Image (spheres, coloured by chain):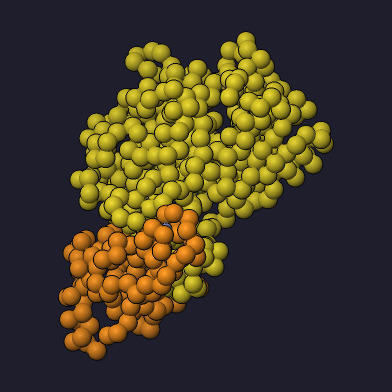
Chain colours: A yellow, B orange
Amino acid sequence: MSGDVSIIGAGLSKFGRQPGRTGRDLALEAIAAALADAGLAWPDVQVAFGGSDGSGLADTLVADLGLTGIPFTNVKNGCATGGSALMSAMNAIRSGAAEIALAVGFDKHPRGAFDPRPEDWGLPAAYGEAGLMVTTQFFGIKIARYLREHGISERTLALVAEKAYRNGSLNPNAWRREPISADEIAAADMVNDPLTRFMFCSPGEGGAAIVLASESVAAGNGRAVRVLGAATRTRRFGSFEVFSPSIQGSGRPSSVSSDAAAAAFAAAGVTPDEVDVAQLQDTESGAEIMHLAECGFCKDGEQEAMIAAGETEIGGRLPVNTDGGCIANGEPIGASGLRQVHEIVTQLRGEAGDRQVRRGHSADPRVGFTHVYGAPGISACTVLAV
Amino acid sequence: MGRSLTGSRCRNCGNVAFPPARGCQSCGGSDQETLELGTCGTVWGFTVQRFAPKSPPYVVPEGGFVPFAVGYVELPEGVKVEAVLDCTDFARLDGAEVTLVATEPVPRFATDAALVSEGATS
Ligand SMILES: [Zn+2]
């Protein structure tokens, strides 16, 4: 593969409940913001990829953007929708098919959304009748075992969620902007042990868009952020996923996040210890803890001391989910992956305002990382740099 | 009790699946034989369902919802099967030895203590 790809524009819609606005409205808001950020207009875009999980087809957006005739491919890849769209846009530029490409993701989920049907997951209806079609059970089972295996306290789960709300309070675009103390988080209603209500993200609303450009277009753009590496993966044998009637194979389950992260780092020629700021999938606070290890940022069990020492805080050694993550922004499935990229771009440009990460005492971060993970065992990662 | 869970074993690589596999997740082979799985295992991981799941699809038992444990039981064949877990104390479930007590509507295993108390009440 030849030719560097850079991000020259990044845009978000408002996140959180927005009565009267459709998912498509949020997508259009994000695209307008990303194009304005890039100093471009829609007719400049030569190829586009995008999607939502439950809010319609991205290619219908051309009715409102302008009928320029470009190829616009719909992506539907669960939580990896944004990551897959970004990969496709990158590959279009690398192949020489386009110089300027757009990736967009959006969703508007109603309160209490995510009603999985057993039939859609290849399971007998009995799993629903028996009360096993509950997404949060998977997260509880996985983190409960992980905490026991690696000597991590339940207090650490509360600290991760506390950080998410605190970072959200610094982010004008976040949905949840009220800090919540670790004590209150720990004392909230238990959903699935050891996870309480305040440790989970909620189905939400939002759109995110990224404009990518070839080396020649990005040349001389002082705000361009290079995509050093990106990878999407599906699960390998032996993984443990939501709604699995069994886990096959012996020994420790495989991790699709580890596979995607390793591939992205290898493509980038960067190691995890070179990363200055990271966005990790935090469907619930336990996921952030496990993904720190799965993506290569620490060994299993080291999270307890890392988090207690504040290393993942905005002022710490490896700030994680500086915009408040899914916990503070909500989970519009199609948008979250590109929201993460938007946050890293904002951090690397030094434009993150009250939540800006500093390397040492003054310098802006230089290398960032994004990671999404979702059903049925997919992950997308990027390594970005300035 | 004469009941067991039916899984499958890959004739190419020996991988065991539950429910029976059409194709092998390990080697991609399509030649699978059915296999009756062992009825005793150990709890590999679990959580507690604290709230009644959304109904429907959940069918609330007679007498109303009570929190129940759900998790994965590691069987002698190596496969870990998702199941409802009957126990008398959630805090003692990790690694507990459990016995299959029902295959329908979903697999259900019980600890020895739960077997004793179920025997006493039924
Ligand atoms: Zn096989």
Residue sitting farthest toward the top? A220
Q: How many numbered marks, from 0 up? A: 0
Query: Which one is in front, A56 or B116?
Result: B116
Q: x and y percent of residue A349 in the render?
A: 51, 19
Q: Left or right: where does residue A63 sit relative to residue A189? A: right
Give the residue displayed 34% in from the left and 75% down from the top: B36
Residue B110 sits in quarter: bottom left
Residue A135 image position (x, y, % from top left) = 44, 58
Vertical comparison of A354 with A105: above or below = above
Q: In this view, does A69 lie above or below A110?
A: above
* Residue sitting nearer the eye, A55 or A127: A127
Residue drawn 38% across and 13% down? Answer: A362
Which corner quadrant of the image does residue A271 belong to? top left
- The answer to whether residue A351 is left or right of residue A214 is left
At horizontal 64% and vertical 20% (from top left) the residue drawn is A214
> Is any atom of residue B121 visible in this view?
yes
User: How far across and how far down the image is residue A257, in percent?
Assistant: 42, 41
Residue A20 image point, x, y percent = 67, 50
Q: Can residue A175 be seen in this view?
A: no
Quadrant, the N terminus of chain A: top right
Q: Residue furthest front?
A: B12
Residue found at x 39% / y 19%: A358
- Ligand 1 resides in the quarter of the picture at bottom left
Can you say whether B48 is above or below B106 in the image? above
Q: In this view, does A385 lie above or below A15?
A: above
Q: In the rendered view, does B103 fall on the left or right side of A112?
A: left
